[in-house]
Image (cartoon, helix red, strand yellow):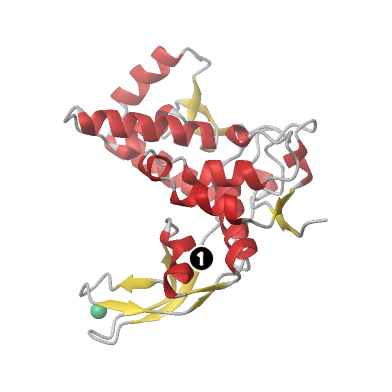
Amino acid sequence: MSQTIIFDLPSKGLVYPLDNPLSTGKMELRYGKAADEDILANVSYIKNRTVFYKLIDALKVDKEINLNEMIMPDFNAAVIASRVAMYGDEYEPTIICPECGSKKKMTIDVDMKHFVELDESVLFEKNKNIFEYETKNGTKLKFKLLTVEGDQSLNKFRISSQAAGRTFNEAIQGLRYTIIEVNGKIKPEEIMVYINEMTSVESKAFRKHIMSITPQAKIVSEYMCNNCGYSHQNMEVEIDTNFFWEIQDNI
Ligand SMILES: [Zn+2]
């Protein structure tokens, strides 16, 4: 038997229907092999930002799990768990100081201690990815937390917008994959009309609310800049493909 890692989902499984294996609140990944490293090196996967999707899809033990339905924090937790399974928990990123821009090589322990779990009381209905929100002017919204599928669509839309030279507002476009009902209306075109007419204040307040209830799978580290003295107790460390390759490069 090959080795596996089992980790807790930040959603605790509460947003998935009971017939979905993710509703157990746990996920199991097998340890990576050489063939899995080929996924991480695939340039086209990196370019279209599907590299982590392909990796987790290859490592998931329960093949019934549909990654598209996962909410992003759970998926990000899977990426972090797979990193630990493949290369251990020591990570040496180069961090750029947000204050002065100077670079610093750090050694970080990759752990899952800083994940923020979903608060069950914010659910509209248990075992469903549905939440409710009422705006200041009384508009009743139903929304879901961004799923892997929504994130992938958002990525495609971003890439095509940029290629066509169109402006792309990440925050606003993200709402297309989040809002599922506006005052009882569920047609995508009706929802889009609402999003386009939302005032900045309204949209900002709504996005802030989403942020406040969204579970988090992040890696944080204490940081202190040697150049300007800027310090942060829990600085977020970005997870990109370097997250996997950093150690490799040093060998
Ligand atoms: Zn600095």
Where in the figure is residue 200, as x and y percent of width and height?
Answer: 28, 37
Side (left or right) of 223 relative to 125: left
Where in the figure is residue 120, as x and y percent of width and height?
Answer: 69, 46
User: Farthest residue in the front direction?
Assistant: 34
User: Farthest residue in the left direction?
Assistant: 165
Q: Is residue 215 visible?
A: no
Side (left or right) of 121 relative to 201: right
Side (left or right) of 110 relative to 48: right
- In the image shown, does 51 or 68 lie closer to the viewer? 51
Where in the figure is residue 199, as x and y percent of width and height?
Answer: 28, 32
Is label 1 in a helix, a strand or a loop? strand
Where in the figure is residue 202, as x and y percent of width and height?
Answer: 35, 36
How many numbered discs sit on the rendered protein? 1
Q: Is mark 1 within 8 Å of ligand 1?
A: no
Which quarter of the figure has residue 70? top right
**Which corner quadrant of the figure contains ligand 1?**
bottom left
Is 70 above or below relative to 59? above
Q: Is residue 102 visible?
A: yes
Residue drawn at 53 percent across, 16 percent down: 184
Is 219 above or below relative to 51? below
Residue drawn at 53 percent across, 54 percent down: 37
Which quarter of the figure has residue 188? top left
Residue type at mark 1: give it: Ile
Q: Residues within 10 Å of mark 1 (few under 14, many from 20)?
A: many
Residue assigned mark 1: 219
Is 45 above or below relative to 189? below
- In the image shown, does 242 or 236 lie closer to the viewer? 242
Side (left or right) of 81 relative to 171: right
Dividing the image into 4 quarters, which one contains the N terminus?
A: bottom right
Residue drawn at 43 percent across, 66 percent down: 237
- In the image shown, does 233 or 251 lie closer to the viewer? 251
